[in-house]
Image (spheres, rainbow, N blue to C red):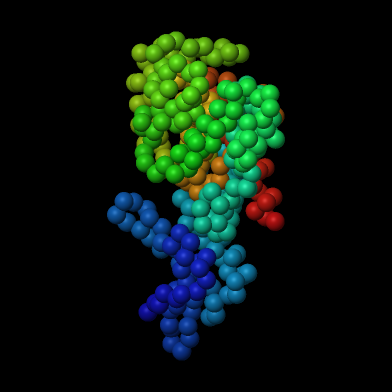
């Protein structure tokens, strides 16, 4: 016999609840989570709580533990076992204490994200100027018009990606690129490029424009195939790197790839990551390794950035 109890609101996060079972003269309590293992099947993960329901603070520990048990086990193709375990601890903690991945983000996240992702591409706005544009709707004196437009576009693109619940396809990635490049000098907005391009400072030569549609479709199919088996950090790594390598757009490839990377992370209940302009050299070095077929450098870089940006705050 089991009875579902109405207890703390936090218990119901992602279908966790307390179950009471009667054996003889005593009640026994379990923390239970429903975990979907296929489109039509689900299983229950249980943790024994004892003959009494723990108090709120103690229950938090059990909630974190059941989240860790409920997560599908990833072996880690490029990440070490230790890194995977630390990432899963972070994800479990984020799920328990926040109802959505976006709730983990600090209040100034969008300003810092916009400043860094644009600065990597040569935008001259300072962090303070970016804040004036996004928070106060003020165009800083002396700022280049195109830089201001890029900051506003970055905010619009972030809001679009954050709310998008559909599948990864051409329409989605082209919409991201459009939001990033609208009202700028970018020649082709919202569609694949129709000319050859070069990546300044890189030895990699992107494919011809005639090859782009086929390569991008292969990317979408690869994502669909790997999203249930590859660790989300590694999946975000792979999609980011392959999109950069294909370079499907005349402009906005890096910013699109970083937004797409964060879309994958948040769909898998990880918080979004900021690639800081201070780490630009290492970031580009990781991409160069990926261009040559080695994804490990970027996967480790991304994992370390996430742990550095969120672990301390969540532990506190």
- Tell me how many marks there are: 0
Q: Quadrant of the N terminus?
A: bottom left
Q: Is residue 283 above or below residue 85?
A: above
Give the vertical position of 150 relative to 97 (above or below): above
Which quadrant would residue 289 be assigned to in this image? Answer: top right
- Residue 96: x and y in percent read 55, 59
Which residue does the image show at 39% across and 77% down from the upper left? 2
Is residue 85 shown left or right of residue 170? right
| Residue drawn 35% across the image and 21% down it | 213
Which residue appears farthest toward the bottom when viewing the image?
Answer: 25
- Expressed as whole percent of the image width and height from the top left, the position of residue 298 reads 58, 30
Asked if residue 305 shows in the view, the reply is no
Q: Is residue 28 visible?
A: yes
The answer to whether 178 appears left or right of 272 in the picture is: left
Query: How far across and how far down the image is residue 175, in percent?
Result: 41, 31
Q: Which residue is at 63% across, 48% downward? A: 106
Tell me the quarter of the picture where residue 190 sits.
top left
For the residue pair 219 and 29, the one nearer the viewer reads as: 219
At 49% from the left edge and 35% from the top edge, which residue is drawn?
157
Residue 218: x and y, percent?
36, 26
Q: Nearer the viewer, residue 53 or 263?
A: 263
Q: Nearer the viewer, residue 63 or 105?
A: 105
Q: Is residue 195 left or right of residue 295?
A: left
Instruction: For the C terminus, give its image quadrant.
Output: bottom right
> Which of the 4 quarters of the picture holds residue 15?
bottom left
């Amino acid at each position: 016999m089991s009875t579902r109890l109405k207890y703390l609101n936090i218990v119901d996060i992602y279908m966790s609840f307390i179950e009471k079972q009667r054996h003889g003269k005593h009640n026994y309590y379990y923390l239970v989570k429903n975990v979907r293992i296929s489109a039509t099947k689900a299983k229950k993960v249980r943790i024994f709580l004892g003959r009494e329901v723990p108090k709120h603070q103690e229950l938090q520990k059990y909630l974190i533990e059941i989240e860790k048990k409920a997560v599908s086990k990833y072996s880690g193709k490029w990440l070490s076992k230790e890194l995977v375990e630390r990432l899963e601890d972070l994800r479990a903690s984020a799920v328990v204490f926040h109802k959505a991945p976006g709730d983990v983000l600090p209040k100034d996240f969008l300003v810092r994200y916009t400043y860094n992702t644009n600065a990597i591409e040569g935008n001259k706005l300072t962090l303070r100027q970016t804040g004036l544009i996004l928070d106060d709707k003020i165009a800083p004196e002396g700022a280049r018009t195109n830089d201001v437009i890029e900051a506003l576009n970055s905010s619009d693109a972030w809001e679009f990606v954050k709310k998008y619940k559909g599948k990864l396809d051409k329409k989605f990635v082209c919409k991201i690129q459009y939001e990033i490049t609208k009202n700028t000098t970018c020649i082709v907005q919202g569609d694949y490029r129709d000319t050859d391009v070069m990546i300044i400072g890189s030895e990699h030569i992107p494919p011809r424009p005639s090859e782009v549609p086929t390569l991008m479709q292969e990317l979408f199919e690869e994502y669909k195939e790997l999203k249930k088996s590859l660790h989300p950090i590694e999946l975000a790594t792979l999609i980011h790197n392959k999109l950069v390598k294909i370079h499907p757009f005349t402009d906005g490839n890096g910013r699109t790839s970083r937004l797409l990377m964060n879309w994958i992370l948040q769909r898998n209940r990880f918080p979004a990551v900021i690639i800081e302009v201070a780490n630009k050299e290492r970031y580009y070095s990781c991409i160069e390794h990926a261009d040559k077929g080695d994804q490990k450098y970027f996967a480790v870089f991304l994992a370390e950035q996430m742990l550095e940006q969120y672990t301390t705050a969540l532990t506190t």
